[in-house]
Amino acid sequence: MPKSNKRFVAMIMSVMILLIGGILLIVYFTTSVQTKKENKEMLQVFADSYEKNGFPDVIDNLPDLADGEAPPDLSDTDGKPDLSDPPPGFIVNKEEGSEMETSYSHLYEISTFYAVVFDLDGNMKEYFNESSSPFSNEELVKYASDLLDNNDTFHQGKSVTSLVTYGEDYILVTMMDTAATDNAISHLVTNMIIFGAISIVVIFILSFYLAKWVMRPAEVGYEKQKQFISDAGHELKTPISTISANLEVLKREIGQNRWLENISYENERMFTLVCQLLDLAKLESATLELSDVDLSLLCEAVILPFEASAYERGVKFSYHIEKNIHIRGNGVALEKLVSVLTDNAVSHCLTPGEVFIELSQKSGKGRLKVSNTGSPLSEENQKHLFERFYKFDESRVEEKGHYGLGLSIAKAAADEMGAEIYVECQEDKVSFIVDFK
């Protein structure tokens, strides 16, 4: 799979994983918050009811009905329940039209509550424990006492949610059985994880094929462009060599001539440009064979010839290279990389100034740092620095044989070997840094 497709798929996958994960978290969070709010309100209704009417009678304690006797008539003349004087076993929860009645009054009615009343000194006075409760009376009192000792006003435990309220002469610990709700939320979380994972897998497969389909035209065009550069470069080498040979013949016949010198200069520029284009096309199109490379020896061999160039320009040239730094890379690409960065530093160093090259190793990773005295680069220049034919110093680069391809070659070489290349600017120093794996 081409690198462009891989990057496209990775980008889509990252976005979709974050999106799906975010949606699932929002669903879980909002569900939990809403459930907590409803539970707390229902517990508060029970507590309010206790303050008005005490504990309700359980259904088993309702008055027995004689044979043929109808149940209590709870309707008034307009057909609505009349709860002004409720019979045993009924609780007046909230007034008519309230949020409780309109939203989840039925949920309140079918919920199971337990409660323990303490005096203000923490001594148990009475308790309410239905027959369906999973607690024995002793367990219920101890559980409520522990909650009171922990000063938890509202607590969500395993299958039990509790609320502590204070009256004038009592402390009420109300508990509600939430086993069904907790089980539903558990299933919700499980299903979200399962279907979220399935969605991610499906999206991965779709994005894989979508990337191939979307990127195919651009990829074909890019491959044709690289092939054209390579073919054109090889074809241009022949006429350039011919021109160079003819110039030598003309120089011997007619001697020095400013027109011949101009042709020779432009021919050399063309040759350098073609060679750089071929280097770039080769690095971008070929899959490099990687092997163990002694980067210390390679750097010493590559940078030594530049001492003379630095001396001619009046630039101080120094370096520090740690011994026996080995990386997995390609020797030819590494030579190009080190050569380009060193040549760039010497060529763009302000005079008088200094070029300093450092090769070090930290945490098992090699780092090449090439620094020179120079004016800091603007953020705009740093963004485009590694683009083809980008020249931030138009007034000086052409006379040095620089055409905006050197750093592109360095970037391509670093990318092919999985290294990271970037620039850092200080007050009077510009540093190009390559971090190798």
Image (cartoon, rainbow, N blue to C red):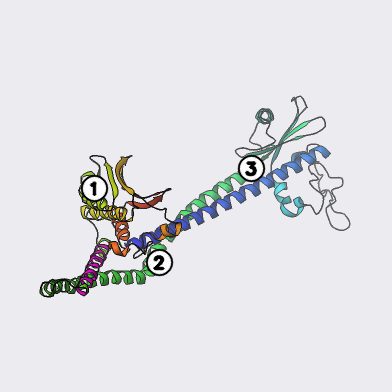
Please tell me whether the stretch drawn in magenta is mainly helix, strand or loop.
Answer: helix
Q: Which amino acid does the dot numbered 2 rest on?
A: Leu
Q: Is mark 1 on a helix, strand or loop?
A: helix
- Residue toward you, 360 or 268: 268
**Left or right of residue 178, residue 423 in this image:** left
Question: In the figure, 125 relative to 41: above or below?
Answer: above
Mark 1 in CB contact with mark 3 (< 8 angstroms):
no
Q: What element carries label 3?
A: loop
Q: Is mark 2 on a helix, strand or loop?
A: helix
Q: What stretch is highlighted in magenta?
A: 259-280
Q: Which numbered tag is attached to residue 178?
A: 3
**Residue occupying the point 34% across, 62% down:** 396
Q: Which amino acid does the dot numbered 1 rest on?
A: Cys
**Left or right of residue 339, residue 384 in this image:** right
**Residue occupying the point 23% across, 70% down:** 233
Residue at the disc numbered 1: 299
For marks 1 and 3, the one nearer the N-term is 3
Tell me the CA gap for discs 1 and 3. 70 Å
* Crowding at mark 1 (Cα within 10 Å: few <14, some 14-19, many 20+): many
Tell me the CA gap for discs 1 and 2. 43 Å
Image quarter of the N terminus: bottom left
In magenta segment, residue 265: yes
In magenta segment, residue 80: no
Numbered disc in front, either 1 or 3? 1
